[in-house]
Each structure stands twice: as structure tokens, then as C-alpha cells.
């Protein structure tokens, strides 16, 4: 069988389909020949010898006629095991098997195998590597190893290898877990050589996203939301998946397409996509959750520049609650007293001293209070 051109996915896919068809014919002939041998041993005490190779090849080629498609026939006749298959076919004929009935049935099976393999390859090509990106997300923790895999130029080849192993019954998740541990070892060893073995500092994006947006999600410490492509890789979201999640949001808000676009382009959108991906892996009805956005339109209210961000927060809110049972989103209220106090056009209102002190301390996070406030005026 001719070797397919390396790197041409269409040629390789066709070759794989034909090779599978030849394997199917080889299997059927081997089984039929095993049956023939057993019956002859039981009847005569010995097996009938196979016919001479050259004679069998000529006779078998004539028997094939036009039963097989050209690609399968060419693969059969040029294969290294064709002489053996030809001998088996002619031995079956001499043993009383009617090849005119037997071979058409074999041809039907073989062509079906070829077409099924070709269809499967086409489906894999259509879906891309999304299935294996999901497996990576579910099997490997966020971090340098997972991102290295997804950002590698050889990722399609890695995904194809995972697919072949899976088809052969190999537990790909177990291999990934072991490979992850080895990858961490490589990462640490190389980091030491590069004098960069320190633990990564938690990024500003990871710190600011801490809370409802990342609750229950696997978030890398060096999350970089400023780089959309990298953020999606870090979260193991393929471009195809991201586009599908964006469509799901738009489908949930048919009358708010512009607002949905603003949410998808918002900086923190990858976190919502990651939550949708996690829910899908858990068989949760994502679309039913998103339907709650049309029931609570409070996200529409507020300053226009923050509209996309508010919709992101609301989408995350409905995704984290049972469909139809998400409570109204708590929105921070504007303090009119604070607004007046900070205004350059409105003079401050007089507030009793006892009440004025409370908001000043309550409005500052504990970790930002680094020392006592300087006294008002001079002391003698």
C-alpha cells in the first residue's frame, strides 16, 4: 500500500479508511480460513495444503473482478499480505465455498468499514480538538503544563495521538495525569536552570477575579485576562467552544444582541466561558440557566460603559443558581451622602460627628488600613 503524503490530512484520512477496509477483509478471510482448517482436520485428519502462490494470486485476482472499489482493490493487490489472502481465498474455493456469493458479502462489509472510518475522520476534523481540550481541562489542573500543551504548535498532533489511544481502549486520562507530573518535573528543572524557579506570583487578574466569578473554577495563578487568546488557553477553552458559548448567550437574549456582544468582548468574559465549560462537563443545562437573564433585566440599568461587565456578572449569577431560581442580582447602591461629600459643585452637608466617623472606617477594607489616621490640626 502506498505511503500517504505526510502532512496532508485529506490524503492521510483516505488512506486510513482504505487501510481499515483491507484490515476488515484480512480479518474475514482469516476467520473463514480458520473454519476451513478445523472442518478439514475433523473430517480428514489433516488440512488441505494451500495452492501455489503465483497460481493463487492470478486466480484470486480474476475472482475479485469489479467487486471492490478501485481504491480498495489497489490496496489489496499491492499489499504485502496479498499472496497469503489469495491463497486463503482459493483454498476456500477448493474446499467448496462459492466465492461468487461469498466475496460480494465480504465486499459489502469492507466498503461499509471504509465509509465508517472516513465519516469518523471527517467528524473529528469538523470538531477539531475541542473534545481533547475538554479532557485536558477536566484532567489537568490549570498551570504551566496545561497551557504549554494547548499553546504548542504540535497540539493538533498531540490531540490526534490522544484520539488514536482512546480508540484502542487506552485510558487517556491516566496517561495525561502521569504526563502532567512529568511535565511539572521538566518545568521545575528548566526553571532552575533559567534561575526562575520561584513560585509564580498571583497575577492582578487572578486576585481581582477572586469571588463569585471564579468560585468553583480551576483558575491559574498567572491568569492574564488582558491577553484574550492566552486567557482562553489557560482555561482550556478552544476558539470554537468560545464562539459557541457566545452564541448561547445571544440565543438567551434575542432582543439584546448588542448587549450580548459587549459582554463577550468584556475583559472577564473568559471566566463565564470557563463556567459554561465546567457545567457542560457536569451535564448541567447551560441554556436553561442562561434563560434567567431575560427574566431579570436589572443588568440593563446603570452607566453605559459598564453594561458589558454588568451582563457578565449577571450571566455568572444565573449560571451559579438553579434554573429559574436565581435571586435578583445584588447591585452596589450609590451613596448620595458620599457623592455630595466628594462633589466639587455641591457643598458638604453637616453630619453629626458620631455618625460621620462610622462610614469612614467601614468604607475602607481592613487590609488597606495600615496605621492610625493623622490628627486634624497641630498639637502643642
Image: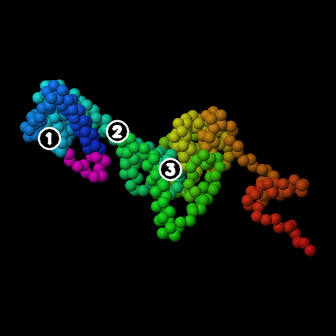
Q: Is residue 239 visible?
A: no
Q: Nearer the viewer, residue 240 or 195?
A: 195
Question: 10 Å neighbourhood of mark 1: few (<14), some, or many (≥20)?
Answer: many
Task: Return the residue nearer the eye: 124 or 144.
Answer: 144
Residue 201 in the image, given as x and y percentages of width and height:
59, 62
Provide the residue designation for mark 1. 83
Residue under the point 83% across and 67% down: 374
Which quadrant of the rendered structure holds the N terminus? top left
Please name the residue shown 40% across and 43% down the image.
Answer: 170
Q: Nearer the viewer, mark 3 or mark 1?
A: 1
Residue marked by disc 2? 120
Is residue 345 a member of the stretch shown in magenta?
no
Residue mark closest to the camera, 2 vs 3: 3
Indicate the position of residue 14 as horizontal and vertical percent values.
27, 42
Identify the magenta region.
1-12
Disc 3/disc 1 C-alpha distance (Å):
48 Å
Residue 113: x and y in percent read 28, 35
Amino acid at each position: 500500500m502506498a505511503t500517504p503524503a505526510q502532512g496532508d490530512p485529506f490524503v492521510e484520512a483516505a488512506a486510513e479508511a482504505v487501510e481499515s477496509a483491507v484490515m476488515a477483509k484480512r480479518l474475514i478471510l482469516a476467520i473463514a480460513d480458520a473454519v476451513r482448517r478445523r472442518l478439514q482436520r475433523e473430517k480428514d485428519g489433516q488440512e488441505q495444503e494451500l495452492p501455489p502462490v503465483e497460481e493463487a494470486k492470478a486466480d484470486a485476482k480474476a475472482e475479485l473482478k469489479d467487486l471492490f472499489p478501485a481504491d480498495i482493490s489497489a490496496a489489496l493487490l499491492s499489499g504485502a499480505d496479498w499472496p497469503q489472502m489469495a491463497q486463503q481465498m482459493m483454498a476456500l474455493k477448493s474446499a467448496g465455498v462459492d466465492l461468487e456469493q461469498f466475496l460480494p458479502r465480504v465486499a459489502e462489509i469492507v466498503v461499509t468499514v471504509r465509509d465508517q472510518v472516513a465519516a469518523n475522520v471527517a467528524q473529528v476534523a469538523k470538531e477539531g480538538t475541542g473534545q481533547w481540550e475538554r479532557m485536558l481541562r477536566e484532567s489537568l489542573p490549570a498551570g504551566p503544563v496545561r497551557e504549554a500543551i494547548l499553546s504548542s504548535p504540535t497540539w493538533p498532533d498531540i490531540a490526534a495521538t490522544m484520539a488514536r489511544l482512546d480508540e484502542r481502549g487506552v485510558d487517556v486520562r491516566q496517561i495525561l495525569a502521569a504526563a502532567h507530573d512529568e511535565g511539572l518535573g521538566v518545568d521545575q528543572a528548566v526553571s532552575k536552570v533559567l534561575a526562575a524557579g520561584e513560585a509564580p506570583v498571583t497575577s492582578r487578574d487572578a486576585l481581582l477575579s477572586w469571588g463569585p466569578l471564579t468560585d468553583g473554577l480551576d483558575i491559574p495563578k498567572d491568569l492574564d485576562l488582558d491577553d484574550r487568546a492566552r486567557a482562553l488557553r489557560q482555561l482550556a477553552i478552544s476558539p470554537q467552544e468560545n464562539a459557541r458559548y457566545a452564541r448561547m448567550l445571544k440565543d438567551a437574549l434575542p432582543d439584546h444582541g448588542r448587549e450580548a456582544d459587549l459582554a463577550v468582548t468584556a475583559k472577564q468574559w473568559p471566566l463565564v466561558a470557563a463556567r459554561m465549560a465546567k457545567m457542560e462537563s457536569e451535564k448541567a443545562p447551560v441554556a436553561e440557566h442562561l434563560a434567567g437573564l431575560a427574566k431579570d433585566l436589572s443588568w440593563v440599568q446603570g452607566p453605559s460603559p459598564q453594561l458589558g461587565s454588568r451582563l457578565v456578572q449577571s450571566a455568572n449569577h444565573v449560571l451559579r443558581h438553579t434554573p429559574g431560581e436565581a435571586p435578583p442580582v445584588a447591585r452596589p447602591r450609590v451613596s448620595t451622602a458620599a457623592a455630595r461629600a466628594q462633589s466639587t459643585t455641591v457643598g458638604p452637608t453637616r453630619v453629626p460627628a458620631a455618625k460621620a466617623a462610622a462610614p469612614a472606617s467601614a468604607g475602607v477594607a481592613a487590609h488597606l488600613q495600615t496605621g492610625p489616621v493623622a490628627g486634624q490640626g497641630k498639637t502643642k
